[in-house]
Image (spheres, rainbow, N blue to C red):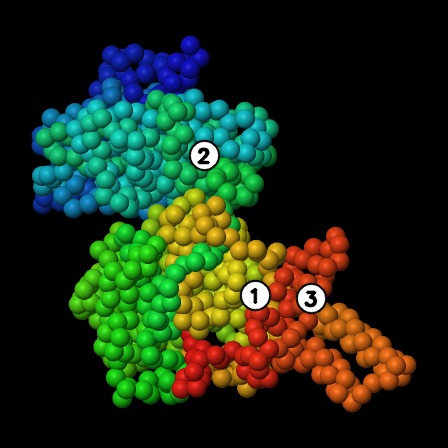
């Protein structure tokens, strides 16, 4: 019985149908006919529509100057639509601010509830005399809503919609302390031109959700079987009050869940576009889930119409064929727990809303303990716990046979998750490749004669497709679109290419060998990625320019954003020091960038370039080379870093991050060798990860630990290799990586290093002393004992020489010399109870410990291991 009454109350609050509460329908109809209309001079006169002199016209529906006296007031007003013939609403333009208005609703009515200029439609009267049809909703400073071409809401004539009623909810009346009159409302763009597709609203709402105080996560689920003609959702709007974290809507067909829309209700409550084309047919199930948190509340929160209450609403705006048009429907049925066991994990992950993203001014209750809750996003432990991310391990026996590759600059996956490799064949990027104007100097040798784009079976490593011969000079970035076209960049040509699966040219942007910074030129572009929904693509440009450029599907310049970060201080949002890698997040329409020399990931709204957030961890170090996104497990980011240019850096390794929170979930690296220079990364939905290593000239494959067929004896912790970098070598590497600004770059890295050192409050000098003093003591003790032994027992010259070489070997390996070394990991691990974590591979021998003695070398330049003909192969 209580549930039935609750449902009736909610229908009264939201739909406002023919429940008139104080007067019966007949008396209200009499009032409507008799009551005159009064017009305050301070607000637009919207009693009659603009007299149309053409097929198109406007209709203002505005409050006629009201001053609410109490919070949570609901006021309504109305305006007639043109009589005698059908017309169509094709656009909604709101006029309101959330500082004064909590939300607005537009209803289509045959008759309004009363003929008064405005009335209390929250407690005294309803909105319509008979049935009320929701046509539009606005909240939280949402932008205008424009319908697709040939789509409109049909009104007038025989539709039964003769009036538009505007309902305004004034949440917090603090803004009315000056007693000003409010004229909030909506301007309707209308036409008499017949629209072949008719728009409508499908409203899903919960009526029985209960949010206990302090409860971390509470779900409200709605589901209804659809039994009407086919509809095509094209926009959606979420609505809750302060406790809502995320609202998601799905179509369920044959057990498969397809997303309609997902958004934080703390963002502007606009109608957001449905990203993937979708239809809903007879027999489908329409579902929605609202995720709430009771954190901060001291009493139970129920569904209701005040600021202390909550709501769970999902508005789906759709179109359908005119002959089957139904302008409004709603669903209030609670979804079964059995059905919602299959809901995609993304529905359980709150969407972060930082203070600068949230629109301030949401109504609050005075002295309410949760008045700022909309700005407080739940931490990781407050979220629904999803499947734990498995640790990634190297697939030891993969690829099984040696792949003959050049410098691997890019990796990607096609629509069948086959691995795509972009490599440089016999070309290398060295210090002589470019002049100071970024002009490629080896044009005379011609393009790479080998196929530079290889598509491989990810299991058998069989080459399925090979293209790209005699096209490229210095390949760099690669990505795929849904049609398996190749999108690539070439830093020598300063061009971006779209190639078909057979290697045919579909699109070329930029002028060959001509660097530039205008809309028709690039300067060493690094990467390109495609929006799978709209077809727009984005170019990271790159080494000489610090910008992201957006193009239409046919290559027309749309916009660009970004600037070079300063050489000192902390880089600002939207600034880049080599935007090196891109990844697209379709579900949220976001573009994330690996800002390489700033050691961070920056994410933006793809369509506008608006900065959203940055992700930065100490484990990244100063350089982050590549980033990749997958939607599995609620959204994950994969990234790889690079070796520091100056001084001692963090280990070179891969990272798995929670996309929503930015939390570091896993760190991975090869188990038997080391990354040399991991340059690109791509991840599949099954959590298989591929890393292209430009210096090792290979691709590494990593799989979740439970899927690894051969597990090596892993070394504990995340190791750190300690070595010194010769200044000449550092400058050479900077030049080879295409950064002729090496001095500026080194100054920048030194500045960043100082900033990071000061922030950690641990002196590198102190660490060095702590590490060196024990070594010096050990050497001293060894020399003293050896000297004593010589004094006591006698010693020939050869044994003296061997002793000196041994002690010199220990210190020499600290400078990268000798074939032996001091492994501090083994030293500390030999003491019972001492953890090796953090000291694994804290070894001065690198990976040379298993080499034969004759392979030892005294060369101080261990980084370059290529044949003499290409002695400097480090590249970017």
Residue at coordinates 55% horizontally, 86% vertically from top-left?
728
Q: Nearer the viewer, residue 361 or 730?
A: 730
Residue 462: quarter of image: bottom left
Query: Does label 3 or label 2 sit earlier along the sequence?
Result: 2
- Secondary structure type for disc 2: strand
How packed mark 3 is, by other alpha carbons closer than 10 Å (few <14, some 14-19, many 20 or more), is some
Q: Decide: is 867 above or below 29.
A: below
Which corner quadrant holds the N terminus? top left
Q: Which residue ends up furthest to the right in the rendered image?
A: 792
Counting residues from the N terminus, which is met first, the one under dot 1 or under dot 3? 1
Of marks 3 and 2, the one in the foreground: 3
Q: Residues within 10 Å of mark 1 (few under 14, many from 20)?
A: many
First reached walking from the N terminus: tag 1 or tag 2: 2
Where residue 59 appears, as percent x and y from the top left, is 21, 40
Q: In front: 333, or 623? A: 623
Identify the residue position indicated by label 3 in the image.
Answer: 824
Residue 788 location in percent, x, y? Answer: 88, 80
Residue at x-position 41% and y-position 56%: 689
Residue marked by disc 1? 651
Q: Position of residue 433 (x, y in %)?
A: 37, 85
Depth check, mark 1 against mark 3: the one in front is 3
Which is more toward the observer, 442 or 829?
829
Question: Does the CB distance between marks 1 and 3 fall below 8 Å?
Answer: no
Tag 2 residue: 291
Identity of the residue drawn at 26% across and 13% down: 25
**Helix, strand or loop status at disc 3:** helix
Q: CA distance from mark 3 to mark 2?
A: 50 Å
**Residue 606's spot in the image, x, y percent?**
34, 57
Q: Quadrant of residue 505?
A: bottom left
**In screen coordinates, is 130 left or right of 644?**
left
Q: Is 525 displayed left or right of 719 in the figure?
A: left
């Amino acid at each position: 019985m209580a549930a039935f009454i609750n449902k009736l109350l909610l229908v009264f609050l939201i739909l406002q149908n023919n429940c008139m509460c104080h007067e019966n329908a007949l008396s209200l109809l009499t009032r409507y006919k008799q009551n005159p209309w009064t017009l305050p001079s301070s607000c637009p006169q919207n009693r009659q529509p603009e007299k149309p002199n053409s097929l198109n016209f406007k209709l203002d529906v505005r409050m006629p100057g009201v001053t609410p006296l109490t919070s949570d007031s609901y006021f309504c007003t109305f305006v007639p639509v043109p009589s005698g013939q059908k017309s169509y609403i094709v656009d909604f333009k709101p006029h309101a601010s959330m500082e004064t208005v909590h939300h607005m609703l537009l209803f289509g009515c045959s008759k309004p509830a009363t003929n008064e200029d405005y009335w209390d439609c929250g407690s005294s009267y309803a909105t319509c005399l008979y049935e009320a049809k929701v046509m539009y909703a606005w909240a939280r400073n949402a932008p205008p809503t424009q319908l697709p071409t040939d789509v409109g809401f049909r009104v007038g004539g025989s539709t039964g919609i003769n009036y538009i009623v505007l309902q305004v909810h004034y949440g917090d009346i603090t803004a009315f302390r000056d007693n000003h009159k409010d004229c909030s409302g909506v301007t309707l763009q209308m036409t008499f031109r017949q629209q072949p597709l008719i728009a409508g609203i499908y409203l899903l709402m919960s009526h029985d959700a209960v949010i206990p105080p302090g409860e971390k996560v509470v779900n409200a689920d709605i589901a209804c079987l659809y039994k009407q003609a086919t509809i095509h959702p094209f926009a959606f709007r979420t609505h809750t009050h302060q406790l809502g974290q995320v609202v998601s809507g799905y179509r369920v067909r044959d057990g498969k869940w397809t997303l309609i829309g997902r958004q934080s209700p703390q963002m502007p409550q606009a109608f957001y576009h449905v990203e993937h084309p979708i239809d809903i047919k007879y027999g489908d199930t329409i579902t929605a889930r609202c995720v709430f948190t009771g954190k901060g509340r001291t009493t139970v929160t129920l569904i209701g119409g005040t600021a202390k209450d909550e709501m769970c609403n999902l508005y789906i705006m759709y179109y359908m064929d005119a002959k089957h048009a139904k302008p409004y429907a709603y669903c209030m049925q609670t979804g079964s727990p059995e059905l919602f066991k299959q809901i995609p994990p993304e529905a359980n992950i709150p969407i972060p809303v930082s203070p600068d993203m949230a629109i301030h001014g949401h109504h609050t209750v005075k002295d309410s303990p949760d008045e700022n809750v909309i700005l407080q996003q739940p931490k990781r432990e407050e979220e629904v716990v999803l499947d734990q991310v498995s640790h990634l391990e190297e697939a030891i026996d993969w690829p099984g046979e040696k792949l003959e590759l050049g410098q691997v600059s890019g990796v990607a996956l096609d629509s069948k998750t086959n691995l795509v490799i972009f490599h440089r064949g016999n070309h290398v990027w060295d210090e002589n490749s470019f002049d100071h104007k970024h002009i490629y100097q080896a044009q005379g040798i011609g393009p790479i004669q080998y196929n530079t784009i290889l598509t491989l079976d990810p299991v058998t490593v069989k080459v399925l497709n090979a293209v790209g011969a005699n096209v490229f000079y210095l390949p760099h970035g690669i990505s795929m679109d849904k049609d398996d076209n190749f999108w690539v960049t070439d830093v020598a040509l300063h061009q971006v290419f779209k190639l078909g699966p057979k290697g045919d040219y579909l699109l070329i942007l930029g002028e060959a060998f001509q660097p530039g910074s205008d809309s028709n030129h690039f300067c060493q572009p690094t990467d390109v990625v495609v929006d799978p929904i709209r077809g727009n693509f984005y170019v990271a440009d790159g080494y000489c320019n610090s910008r992201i450029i957006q193009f239409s599907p046919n290559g027309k310049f749309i916009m660009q954003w970004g600037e070079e970060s300063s050489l000192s201080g902390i880089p600002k949002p939207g600034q880049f020091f080599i935007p090196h890698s891109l990844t697209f997040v379709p579900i949220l329409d976001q573009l994330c960038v690996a800002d390489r020399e700033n050691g961070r990931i920056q994410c933006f709204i793809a369509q506008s370039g608006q900065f959203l957030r940055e992700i930065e961890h100490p484990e990244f170090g100063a350089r982050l080379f590549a980033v990749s996104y997958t939607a599995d497990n609620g959204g994950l980011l994969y990234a790889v870093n690079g070796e520091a240019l100056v001084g001692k850096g963090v280990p070179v390794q891969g990272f798995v991050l929670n996309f929503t929170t930015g939390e570091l979930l896993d760190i991975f690296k090869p188990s038997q060798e080391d990354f040399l220079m991991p340059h690109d990364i791509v991840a599949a939905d099954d959590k298989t990860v591929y890393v292209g290593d430009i210096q090792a000239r290979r691709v590494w494959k990593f799989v979740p630990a439970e899927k690894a067929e051969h597990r090596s004896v892993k070394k504990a912790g995340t190791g750190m290799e300690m070595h010194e970098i010769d200044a000449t070598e550092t400058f050479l590497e900077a030049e080879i990586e295409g950064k002729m600004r090496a001095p500026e770059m080194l100054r920048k890295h030194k500045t960043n290093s100082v900033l990071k050192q000061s922030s950690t409050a641990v002196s590198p000098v102190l660490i060095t002393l702590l590490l060196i003093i024990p070594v010096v003591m050990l050497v001293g003790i060894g020399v003293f004992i050896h000297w004593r032994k010589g004094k006591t027992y006698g010693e020939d010259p050869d044994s003296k020489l061997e002793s000196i070489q041994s002690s010199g070997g220990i210190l020499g390996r600290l400078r990268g010399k000798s074939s032996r070394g001091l492994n501090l990991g083994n030293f500390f691990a030999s003491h019972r109870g001492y953890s090796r974590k953090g000291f694994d591979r804290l070894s001065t021998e690198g990976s040379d410990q298993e080499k034969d003695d004759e392979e030892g070398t005294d060369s101080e330049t261990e980084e370059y291991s290529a044949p003499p003909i290409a002695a400097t192969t480090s590249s970017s």
